[in-house]
Image: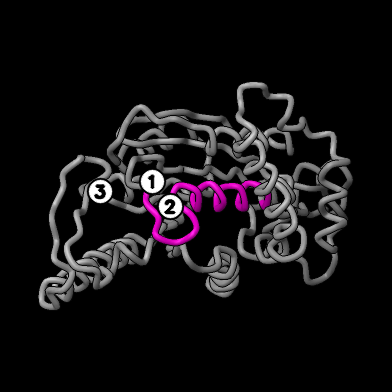
Amino acid sequence: MSLTQTIKDWFKDPTPEPEQDKSLSPELLQRIKAIQVKTNYLVNDIMVGEYVSAFKGQGMEFSSVREYQAGDDVRLIDWNVTARMDQPFIKEFKEERELTVMLLVDVSSSGEFGSADKLKNEISAEIASILAFTAIKNNDKIGLIVFSDKIEHTIHPKKGKAHVWNIIRTILNFKPEGKGTNLALPLEYLLKIQKRKATAFLISDFQDDNYEAKLKLAKQKHDLVAITIVDPREETLPDVGFIQLEDAETGETLLVDTHDKVMTHQYAKQVEVKKEKRKKQFRSIGIDTIELYTNRSLTEPIIRYFKMREKKH
């Protein structure tokens, strides 16, 4: 399907138009429309098949019964029907395709940073939109938990494009009350509100500590995928002389001489050690991870992960 046709299809769709919401600014409406068109195109042409292959459903459900044939598994015999019909019948099952997908999106102040074209929180919004469209295209339910150092907002899982529009609008238009990051909170909240197994994407820059215990608990109940948003300037400092760094979440500032090669090397090394420690923790718990950079393709790592997941499962 061409991009032109996708745009035509989108605006023929009965989904409520963003203009109907008078509370949104023209700039925000334009951003939402751009994400709608872009993600709808990507999901239609690229990602649907990979998603279906990667996420198989939550088990098998009873479909029907049929007469027993030579070679059938005798453990599948339906003894009640067999007794009534006076000949053997077996149960048939089909895969339960429908999934519940939960997006856990970090809206803390550290997301208001970006040295490339987009801020980290804008990348988070695009990723959440891509995943939401992909789920809806496969008739899966999609829900949202927005968090900072508190649970900011929740949208319970539902189906439909109008529901996706609500999720996208919420993420892009959200003004969080909290500045910090508490990753344990959304994981604990997910366990509280989502009783059935779900596929949960935790989207954050993971600027937090002491959340591993909640990760383990959430992984035991749900299929958990960690998506890390990274800006290249968080890993290496440019050689531009003295710069003042500010922690967006705490407000603390630090004057740094980027001409100092020893200091910048130590900084890069500490960042790498922290990143590898986090990856090791995820692996030990059994959590899949996707790493996305603000200055690189967003879809390629996701598609690569879907293909990898298909081989694993």
Q: Residues within 10 Å of mark 2 (few under 14, many from 20)?
A: many
Return the mark for residue 59: none
The answer for how far apart the CA atoms under marks 3 and 1 are is 16 Å
Residue ID at (19%, 68%): 241
Q: In this view, does 179 lie to the left or right of 26?
A: left
Residue ID at (77%, 30%): 16
Q: Residues within 10 Å of mark 3 (few under 14, many from 20)?
A: few
Q: Which residue lies furthest to the front in this view?
A: 241
Circle 2: element type: helix
Q: Does the magenta run of residues contain 274?
A: no
Circle 3: element type: loop
Return the mark for residue 120: 2
Q: In this view, does 292 lie to the left or right of 64?
A: left
Q: Does the magenta run of residues contain 116?
A: yes
Label located before the other in sequence (1 or 2)? 1
Circle 1: element type: helix
Whether pointer 1 and pointer 2 mark residues with C-beta atoms closer than 8 Å, the reply is yes
Task: Quarter of the image for the C terminus: give it.
Answer: bottom right
Residue 226: image location, x then y, percent: 42, 56
Residue ID at (43%, 52%): 120
Give the camera-side residue of 209 and 271: 271
Q: What stretch is highlighted in magenta?
A: 112-134
Main structural element of the magenta stretch: helix, strand or loop? helix
Q: Residue furthest top?
A: 22
Residue that badge 1 annotates: 112
Residue that badge 3 annotates: 208
Three-letter code, disc 2 = Lys
